[in-house]
Image (cartoon, grey):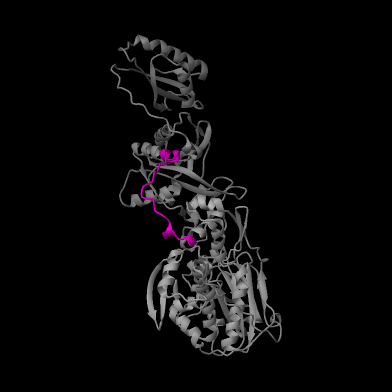
């Protein structure tokens, strides 16, 4: 922020030169970024953090200097005289959006004369880098940079119906901002505006309008002093690419409690420089005035946190110098937070204030200290394990944005839920938080197809969002898989194998898939369960949906909501010696009913605990000539191996015969071979 050295000294009982101001404010956390001599004064630029809106003005910086020294802060006071008709007989204020405008005030001054500013105000503004305009406009800028309160002045005679209405914009309304060369803009209905009885006359907290601006012929004015929701101001500013000193300040928060003092100060300056008569009363609209917050701080906790021997009385004096009105009782300070310090909410915030007043540069530096490296969290290891497993299966990781187009989100919203929209202007054509990773992967696949990539496997592990039936916002971690296949039917089993691999990497051995009909984006779809808990779906990507995204290649896809599985301890993999003796493999083909799943067959195999049985693999499933309708032929390959010798085929016959009997008796299997 650009400041004037002389202007800061206006509020100190003893002046501080440019070097002392720079040293003290840097000490308080506002480092000097530049300096320039201006007409016997010095302009200094101090860095401002986003939470310290109270120091985007000269009184705020003077308060910091006074707190760090034995100086007194000279805060400007004003009590302008009032006479004539009451303000509510000359104008009225209607606040239709109190949540976005918690406190709005209007004061009426009649019979002013617009002319150049007096020498003192013009000099202060020029030293800061501003161009003086007129006594009325300069008074608003002076109060902004003096007290940090944005204000605005309307030509009362140009306000239709003598009315101010704080409301949301109506879609399609036109608005012409104040300023040379400004272009008329079209409002989309998401902005907060200040309107008269007919039209918008200002973008709330951002910019005044040209049609109600003060000119040389202005005689009667309505003085606005208010506070607006920082998010709303930022939205409007970014949406129309219009910024101002007012929006900069409102985006950092202005308390309703500081509005009236600044408004009185502004009216006093206008009466002093432009003459006129101020009407009795104040036009007010908004919510009830909030109560000043109280925050407690344990003095012993402050010393422990800072590692500094700052005694109780010194802590109290530091906070008192900053305007906190502290009361010490049995080692606990109760501080009443001043209106201008909207960044103070917790004990640690007060501890930070003590630290700032003590000075970061005055903290002794330990040249040697001991540290203990933190262990990587379990979910970090889980991410690495999942990524390694998928890369081993020829997948490529994708990292995409969480915002997608509204049309892309529709098919992927969970049943009973709704998609979440953001109002941030820069979202442009992609305002929806994605309800699944799959649409993001489809866009990546389409882009690669445009560049001649004909076979691709993609995965992404990222956050997805939706609102459930009760309207509660849900954010979950989802693993999305997208895999090119020769045809949709043949790709399901390879994808199932990939999921088995991922589950194994997470330490899960019980994986099951149950048919669940169709989903809007999977036809058909299967519900995936890990350790008996449903976690997602796999299936063939709907061809029509794929073409909508520009993907013509047949694909299979899966989503897994991994949740708590990411926090589980991973199994330690043991390296074993390769076998010295060959295995014996036997293929077994059985005809079973369609409703008999591979998992059913594996349960039978596992339950037998056959001697020397090493593994069972699926070979193929056949439906067609020679197989009755409603049945299928499943071929499995059983592997047997002894660690100390070469097995004979006779040793395998017994276990195989037992398995055949079990398959026949439990699932009615018919043996083909």
Residue 510, position as x, y percentages in the image: 48, 29
The image quarter in which residue 228 lies: bottom right
- Of residues 118 and 399, which is closer to you in this image? 118
- Of residues 166 and 199, which is closer to you in this image? 166
Q: Does residue 47 appear anywhere in the picture?
A: no
Q: Does residue 191 appear anywhere in the picture?
A: yes
Residue 613, position as x, y percentages in the image: 39, 17
Residue 593, position as x, y percentages in the image: 50, 24
The image quarter in which residue 199 lies: bottom right
Magenta stretch contains residue 234:
no
The outermost residue toward the left is 580
Residue 131 in the image: above or below residue 637: below
Magenta stretch contains residue 378:
yes
The residue under the point 48% across, 53% down is: 306
Residue 280, position as x, y percentages in the image: 69, 82
- Of residues 394 and 124, which is closer to you in this image? 124
- Drawn side of residue 209 relative to residue 16, left or right: right
**Region in magenta:** 356-382
- Of residues 16 and 427, which is closer to you in this image? 16
- The quarter of the rendered structure image containing the N terminus is bottom left
Residue 178 in the image: above or below residue 116: above
The residue under the point 55% across, 51% down is: 300
The residue under the point 57% across, 90% down is: 113
- The quarter of the rendered structure image containing the C terminus is top left
């Amino acid at each position: 922020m650009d400041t004037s050295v002389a202007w800061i000294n206006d509020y100190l009982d003893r002046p501080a030169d440019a070097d002392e101001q720079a040293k003290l404010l840097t000490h308080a956390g506002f480092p000097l970024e530049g300096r320039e001599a201006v007409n016997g004064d010095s302009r200094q630029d101090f860095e401002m953090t986003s939470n310290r809106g109270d120091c985007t003005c000269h009184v705020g910086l003077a308060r910091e200097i006074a707190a760090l020294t034995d100086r007194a802060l000279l805060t400007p006071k004003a009590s302008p005289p009032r006479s004539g008709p009451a303000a509510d007989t000359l104008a009225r204020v209607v606040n239709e959006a109190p949540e976005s405008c918690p406190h709005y005030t209007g004061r009426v001054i009649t019979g002013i004369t617009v002319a150049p500013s007096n020498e003192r105000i013009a000099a202060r503004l020029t030293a800061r880098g501003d161009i003086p305009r007129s006594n009325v406009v300069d008074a608003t800028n002076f109060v902004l940079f003096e007290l940090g309160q944005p204000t605005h002045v309307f030509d009362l005679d140009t306000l239709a119906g003598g009315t101010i209405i704080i409301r949301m914009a109506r879609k399609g309304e036109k608005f012409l901002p104040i300023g040379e060369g400004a272009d008329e803009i079209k409002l989309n209905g998401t902005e907060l505006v200040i309107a008269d009885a007919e039209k918008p006359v200002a973008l709330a907290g951002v910019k005044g309008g040209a049609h109600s601006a003060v000119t040389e012929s202005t005689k009667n004015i309505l003085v606005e002093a208010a506070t607006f929701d920082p998010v709303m101001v930022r939205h409007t500013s970014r949406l129309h690419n219009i910024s101002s000193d007012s929006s900069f300040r409102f985006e950092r928060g202005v308390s309703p409690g500081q509005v009236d003092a600044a408004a009185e100060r502004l009216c006093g300056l206008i009466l002093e420089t432009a003459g006129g008569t101020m009407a009795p009363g104040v036009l007010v609209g908004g919510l009830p005035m909030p109560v000043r917050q109280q925050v407690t701080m344990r003095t012993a906790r402050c010393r422990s946190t800072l590692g500094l021997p700052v005694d109780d009385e010194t802590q109290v004096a530091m906070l008192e110098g900053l305007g906190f009105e502290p009361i010490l009782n049995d080692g606990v300070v109760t501080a009443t937070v001043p209106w201008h310090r909207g960044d103070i909410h917790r004990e640690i915030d007060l501890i930070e204030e003590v630290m700032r007043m003590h000075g970061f540069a005055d903290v002794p530096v330990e040249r040697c200290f001991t540290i203990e490296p933190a262990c990587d969290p379990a979910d970090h290891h889980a991410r690495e394990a999942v990524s390694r497993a998928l890369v081993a299966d020829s997948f490529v990781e994708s990292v995409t944005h969480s915002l997608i187009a509204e049309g892309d989100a529709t098919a992927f919203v969970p049943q009973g839920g709704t998609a979440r929209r953001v109002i941030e202007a820069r979202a442009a054509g992609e305002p929806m938080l994605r309800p699944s990773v799959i649409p993001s992967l489809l866009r990546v696949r389409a882009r690669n197809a445009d560049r001649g990539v004909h076979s691709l496997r993609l995965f992404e592990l990222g956050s997805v969002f939706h609102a459930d039936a009760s309207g509660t916002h849900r954010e979950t971690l989802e693993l999305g898989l997208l895999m090119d296949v020769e045809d949709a039917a043949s790709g399901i089993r390879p994808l199932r194998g990939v999921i088995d691999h991922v589950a194994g990497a997470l330490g899960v051995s019980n994986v099951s898939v149950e048919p669940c009909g169709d989903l809007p984006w999977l036809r058909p779809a299967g519900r995936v369960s890990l350790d008996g808990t449903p976690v997602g779906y796999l299936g063939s990507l709907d061809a029509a949906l794929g073409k909508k995204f520009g993907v013509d290649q047949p694909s299979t896809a899966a989503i897994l909501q991994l949740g708590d599985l990411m926090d589980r301890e991973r199994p330690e993999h043991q390296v074993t010696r390769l076998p010295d003796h060959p295995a014996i493999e036997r293929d077994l083909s059985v005809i079973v009913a369609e409703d008999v799943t591979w998992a059913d067959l594996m349960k039978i195999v596992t339950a037998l605990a056959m001697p020397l049985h090493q593994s069972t693999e699926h070979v193929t499933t056949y439906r067609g000539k020679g197989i009755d309708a409603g049945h299928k032929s499943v071929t499995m390959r059983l592997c047997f191996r002894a660690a100390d010798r070469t097995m004979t085929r006779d040793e395998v016959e017994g276990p195989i015969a037992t398995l055949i009997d079990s398959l026949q008796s439990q699932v009615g299997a018919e043996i083909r071979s």
